[in-house]
Amino acid sequence: MGKASELEERSFVTRKNFQIIPFLRANRDAYLVKINITKVWVSYFYEGWIPRFEVTIDESFKKLLSEEMSKTSKLPIIIQSTRPWALPATVAAVVFGTLLSPTIDILRFSLAFLGAVLVHLGVNAFSDYMDYKKGADKWYTLGSSRTIIEGLIKPKEVLILGISLISLSLLIGVFILYLTNFNKILLYLILAGGALGVFYAFVPIGWKYIGLGDIAVLLAWTGISFGSYFVQTLTLNTNIIIASLPLSLLIVAILHANNMRDIDDDKSAGYFTLASLLGKNLSKYYYLILVLSAYLLLIYNVIVETIPTWSLLALLSIPIAYRNITWAFKDNYVQKGMLDLFTANLVSRFSLLLISGIVVSRIV
């Protein structure tokens, strides 16, 4: 058919096997081949391999197959558009902040949990739409849900999805305000969180497009933990902010790992992340600082008794952190492409151990 880099039909391959994208990116002369099947033999192997019947692949069969495929549910594509695999970071932040409260109101926790999840999914969908409109998402880029770029869903549908989820989260926020007699500090926290989310990817002044994405993510996830604590206690405790930083810094490291991989793509799209401003070499050391600072702050928080001693269980994730830092200093694009996934895995392990330690401390 021709070079894969020049044909939109490559989406039939990449949409089901996105791992091949780095290969196609590095080998622009790779050709796309279409195999026209005219006949298929079908066997029921419980009775033997001899073909029981044959199917001729003609135009009527293709039409029937197309009609049947059009009946399949669109729900999996809608879910994919929200990038739900990124949720562990938000779940961890809400649970962590809640567990630091002396007492836990299950209703308030459930509402805070649902609100944080919905706004995260909504911002993800909104960000995908904005990246597509800005031209940042191409067939050879990684990081988005790829539902728009692969033609699986219309851009407008993703925009409506994002706005709807963010709106639902705001309604939950209003209900929490009602339960807390419209606490002013909580109102400011909700408004600040909404602004961070919406303007994170709002073209053309989104935080992520002008080198402020890392700061926005740090503030957002620190705010999620602090807000989850405040919803329970309605008490200002700045120690919770310091206690939240180890987890928040590692979440920033996920974003930075993604941006390290995409430095060239982001520049060509006309926007700048902190990684692209630092350059490929300094970005490696920034990643090191983010990860190392998270563990140092964890130890500091235990020393000053902001979090219980059992929280040091999170130190068991250091081998994963060491592997990630090693990979950050590799220059191979494919290896760089794995760093954000490895960092997300680190956040999952770190947060699970951290939360487990806090739970143990509440029991013993």
Image: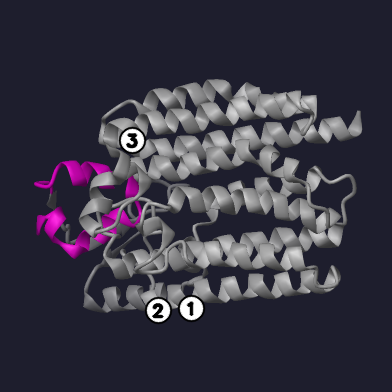
Q: Secondary structure at mark 3?
A: helix
Q: Nearer the viewer, residue 206 or 40?
A: 206
- Which of 156/305 is in front? 305
Q: Which mark is residue 160?
A: 1
> Quick check: marks 1 and 2 in contact, CB under 8 Å?
yes
Residue 87 is at least partly visible in this image = no
Magenta span includes 24: yes
Give the position of the N terminus as an image quadrant.
Answer: bottom left
Crowding around mark 1 (Cα neighbors within 10 Å: few <14, some 14 to 19, many 20+) is some
Q: Tell me if 263 is positioned left or right of 123 in this view.
A: left
* Among the 4 quarters of the image, the one containing residue 297: top right
| Residue holding disc 2 | 156
By secondary structure, the bulk of the magenta-drawn segment is best described as helix
Q: Which residue type does callout 3 highlight?
A: Lys
Circle 1 sits in a helix, a strand or a loop, which is it? Answer: helix
Look at 45% across and 45% down and name the residue there.
Answer: 255
Q: Which residue is mark 3?
A: 336
Q: Which residue is at a point 66% across and 47% down the rendered structure image?
A: 93
Q: CA distance from mark 3 to mark 1?
A: 33 Å
Residue 308 on image: x %, y %: 80, 29
Nearer to us in this view, 215 or 70: 215
Kindly identify the amino acid type of the residue bearing the numbered disc 1: Ile
Query: Magenta segment range?
Result: 1-30
Q: Is residue 267 left or right of residue 27?
A: right
Mark 2–mark 3 distance (CA, rounded to whole Å): 32 Å
Q: Amino acid at mark 2?
A: Lys
- Residue 179, given in percent of the width and then of the height, sits at 85, 70
Q: Residues within 10 Å of mark 3 (few under 14, many from 20)?
A: many
Residue 312: % across, % down: 71, 24
Q: Secondary structure at mark 2?
A: helix
Task: Examine the rendering and report whether any part of residue 170 can be seen.
Answer: yes
Q: Is 199 colored magenta in this rendering?
A: no
